[in-house]
Image (tube, grey):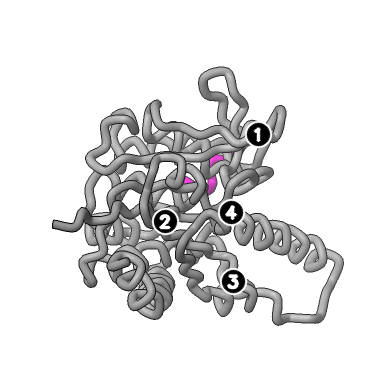
Amino acid sequence: MKKRKTVGLALGSGGFRGFAHLGVIKTLEKHNIPIDMISGASIGSWVAAHYALHRDLEKMEREITENPREKLPILFDLSWRGGFVNGQKFEKFLRKDLGAGDISQTPTPLTIVATDLENGEEIIFEKGKISSLVRASCSVPLIFKPFVYQGHLLVDGGLSNPVPCDVLRKKKADLVIGVNLYHRNEFIVKKFTMAKVVLRSTRITAHNLAVNSCKFADITITPDTSEFVNKIKMKRYFNPEVIDALIKIGEEAAEKMIPQIKAALEK
């Protein structure tokens, strides 16, 4: 009997776009595509960790969308050193959501990527406290205060490896699926103020880094969330309608790639 190929899923960075990851996983599950190992950077690390622990997307969606006004305070834990948000409330929220366990003990093998602020190097974690590592990987510079962990000053994993496909390749996944949240349609707007030039520059960097990361993927899924990029406000980050729309975008993007994924599994 032919041995089934192992599948690794790499969930990329992208802030609020990350809710599209739930839609991608929903579609993979609907088509019985196995997820044998999972990795994540930034928002992707949160979704990856939740899935690796619980394999329950409805639980995550419910926890995120219920009482959105209660979720917003985690983004307003003000700090005046290293970032606008201290991150302590966010980590407390993550501990409640993910528990205090070690990522080496998750039912689905999990890898989280963060970036060492001092030397710019990617740090790959396969051991360590789940909530702390997700907090570190989600530490967007200037927004979140950098996170001190095991002697490292850590920031957003998306700065060094926004779609960590290579770590799954090194773990011997037969088929690596990457989810890149930085779509080219974000670059349609051509009118720029000085602030928009800076913002566009960071998005170009993120997009190019993500494309480079996905060179290690066999298949890349790229949900187009561009319609929300210039409209979304922080106070709507946990808005159920916005989350539902992003999840649907993820579902549709994954659906388009299902024939290719099934063909790759059958080779």
Which residue is nearer to you in this view: 150 or 31? Answer: 31
Horizontal and vertical percent for residue 143?
63, 46
Q: Earlier in the sequence, mark 1 or mark 3?
A: 1
Indicate which disc residue 121 carries.
Answer: 1
The residue that label 3 is drawn on is: 183
- Which quadrant of the figure contains the N terminus? bottom left
Dot 4 lies on which element? helix
Horizontal and vertical percent for residue 23?
35, 68
Between label 3 and label 2, give the one nearer the viewer. Answer: 2
Mark 1 to mark 2 CA distance (whole Å): 23 Å
Q: Earlier in the sequence, mark 2 or mark 4?
A: 2
Give left or right: position of 192 versus 26: right
Query: Residue furthest toward the right?
Result: 194
Q: Earlier in the sequence, mark 4 or mark 3?
A: 3
Q: Which residues are magenta?
A: 74-78
Amino acid at dot 4: Ser
